[in-house]
Image (spheres, rainbow, N blue to C red):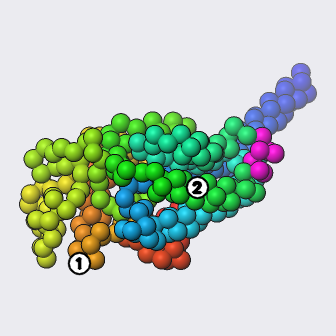
């Protein structure tokens, strides 16, 4: 009987040790499990108003195309980092509103890339040809727009009011949502020109002029001057604004005022992270783009 008793005790002890080791191993595995890599979801919004007119801004097209090449090269580098199987990033271009020119809309559709819907072969094709695809088609977009546009303006304000959440933010939390806007900083679309007190759907000479003073920031705060804010639910979006540029070289202060007002607008919409930069040589802007995306 004593022998049976001791054998039972030993068996129970070994069983307990085995369970402890198993639990420890499970705990270790849980502790060392890495979070899933964030995928890029990049939206590029192009302001194709008169800012791209060769008469007004002869460098606009070249600067935009070179800066967007920096973005596509970053996207490709991220694909390489994740390898083909895991690369599920998305990149697309928006024009607001969509132009009546069917040729331009057809070109834009080619720039809507979703790697999550492609097999490894399709992702390799994206990796190999993305920058060239974007460069060639963007040049065609600018050429067609300059040739045919009546410069009705870019409806960026309404895009934020109605569309930004649906178009630029993925419900899947494994995506990092980034919106990059190419604009001179002025806001205007002929169908949405109104204000509520000192808040406006547009930023033009008419409402900027009173603030072209040395104490412009103080005046803006005192008068609550700015852009009408229609939402505050963009905490899962990052925004980079590029190519802010004064229309008149004698009013270079506009660049500071416009940057301030855009940032104020983003803050009120609870955008998680944002930067606004004035127009510069693409070599300098490249550094800012990469720093933001990193």
- State the extent of the magenta-drawn residues as a range: 119-125
Q: Where residue 129 sits in the image (x, y, percent)?
A: 73, 56
Residue extending furthest front? Answer: 147
Q: Quadrant of residue 77?
A: bottom right
Q: Is residue 119 visible?
A: yes
Where the C terminus falls, by quadrant? bottom right
Nearer-N-terminus badge (2/1): 2
The residue under the point 29% across, 68% down is 247
In-front residue for pair 32/243: 243
For residue 109, side relative to residue 158 (left or right): right
- Is residue 13 visible from the viewing direction of this image? no
Question: To which residue does mark 1 refer?
Answer: 250
Magenta-colored stretch includes residue 124: yes
* Quarter of the rendering occupied by the N terminus: top right
Say whether residue 36 is magenta: no
Asked if residue 3 lies left or right of residue 179, the reply is right
Residue under label 2: 140
Q: Residue at x 27, y 40 (%)?
A: 191
Which of 280 and 269 lies nearest the eye of the viewer? 280
| Element marked by disc 1 | helix
SS type, badge 2:
helix
- CA distance separating discs 2 and 1: 33 Å
The percent coordinates of residue 231 (x first, y second) are 29, 40
């Amino acid at each position: 009987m004593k022998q049976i008793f001791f054998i039972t005790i030993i068996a129970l002890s070994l069983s307990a040790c085995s369970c402890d080791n198993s639990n420890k191993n499970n705990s270790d595995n849980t502790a060392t499990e890495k979070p899933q890599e964030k995928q890029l979801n990049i939206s590029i919004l192009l302001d194709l108003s008169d800012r791209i007119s060769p008469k007004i801004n002869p460098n606009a097209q070249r600067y935009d195309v070179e800066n967007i090449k920096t973005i596509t090269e970053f996207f490709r580098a991220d694909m390489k980092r994740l390898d083909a199987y895991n690369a599920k990033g998305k990149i697309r271009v928006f024009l607001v509103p969509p132009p009546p020119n069917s040729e331009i809309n057809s070109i834009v559709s080619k720039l809507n890339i979703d790697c999550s819907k492609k097999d490894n072969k399709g992702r390799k094709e994206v990796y190999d040809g993305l920058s060239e695809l974007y460069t060639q088609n963007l040049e065609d977009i600018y050429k067609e727009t300059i040739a045919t546009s009546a410069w009705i303006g870019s409806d960026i304000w309404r895009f934020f009011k109605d569309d930004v959440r649906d178009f630029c933010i993925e419900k899947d939390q494994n995506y990092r949502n980034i919106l990059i806007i190419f604009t001179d900083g002025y806001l205007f679309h002929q169908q949405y020109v109104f204000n509520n007190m000192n808040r406006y759907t547009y930023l033009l000479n008419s409402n900027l002029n009173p603030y072209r003073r040395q104490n412009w920031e103080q005046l803006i705060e005192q008068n609550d001057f700015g852009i009408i804010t229609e939402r505050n639910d963009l905490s899962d979006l990052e925004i980079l604004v590029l190519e802010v540029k004064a229309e008149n070289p004698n009013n270079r202060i506009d660049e500071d005022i416009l940057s301030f007002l855009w940032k104020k607008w983003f803050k009120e919409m609870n955008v998680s992270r944002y930067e606004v930069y004035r127009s510069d040589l693409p070599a300098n802007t490249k550094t800012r783009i990469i720093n933001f995306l990193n």
